[in-house]
Amino acid sequence: MKGVVSIVVMIVIMQIGQILSVCKKDNSLSEDLLDMLCKCRKHGFTRKTLPAFTASLTTHKALAAGEVIKFDKIRLNTGNIYDPSTGIFTVPRDGLYLVSSSLMAVNGKHLHCHMWKNGQSNVGAFGTNWSQGTLNTVMNLTTGDKLTIRHDNASGEEVFGSHWSMFSAYLITE
């Protein structure tokens, strides 16, 4: 009987060590998250002030050469930084941003698009036959920079809507 009790005590001691190790990891993660929160607050960021937007396209559309795609359904627009009537994202303050777009081609069609910054082509995306072209880039942007998603091929290509095509950006850090 003493042998069984000794084994049980040893198992409990071993498990306590593992539990304490997990608790330290959880505590470390919590501390990291709190540090990040404090840094954000230090810079004046809150969920309500962090510049961010996401917009999607409600209907599919035949595109002209060089046409700016106007993502007309606003899903998020903190700071009113995206204008769906022009398709322009205007950078509200200097910083490092993540900019993303996914564009679905209509069946039987190709789709060539680029993200443009201040009138200059930057990053491209290509899709064909219901596939999506996706662009994701991290960029240093300056207050007043203007970004759009443009069709950059000859007319006759189509972008699929029904919220399968989208454009978004958010400030990572200043």
Image (spheres, rainbow, N blue to C red):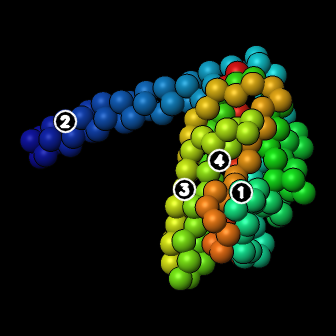
Mark sitting earlier along the chain (2/3): 2
Residue 154 pos. (x, y %): 63, 65
| Mark 1 touches mark 3? (CB < 8 Å) | no
Query: For this view, does 137 lie left or right of residue 5?
Result: right
| Mark 1 touches mark 4? (CB < 8 Å) | no
- Dot 2: what SS? helix
Q: Nearer the viewer, mark 2 or mark 3?
A: 3
Instruction: State how far apart marks 2 and 3 are (Cα).
Output: 60 Å
Instruction: State how far apart marks 4 and 2 are (Cα).
Output: 62 Å
The amino acid sitting under disc 2 is: Met
- Please give the residue where the numbered disc 1 appears in the rendered image: 66
Residue 147 pos. (x, y %): 74, 42
- Please give the residue where the numbered disc 3 appears in the rendered image: 125
The residue at 36%/30% (across/down) is 21
Residue 38 occupies quadrant: top right
Mark sitting earlier along the chain (1/4): 1
| Mark 3 touches mark 4? (CB < 8 Å) | yes
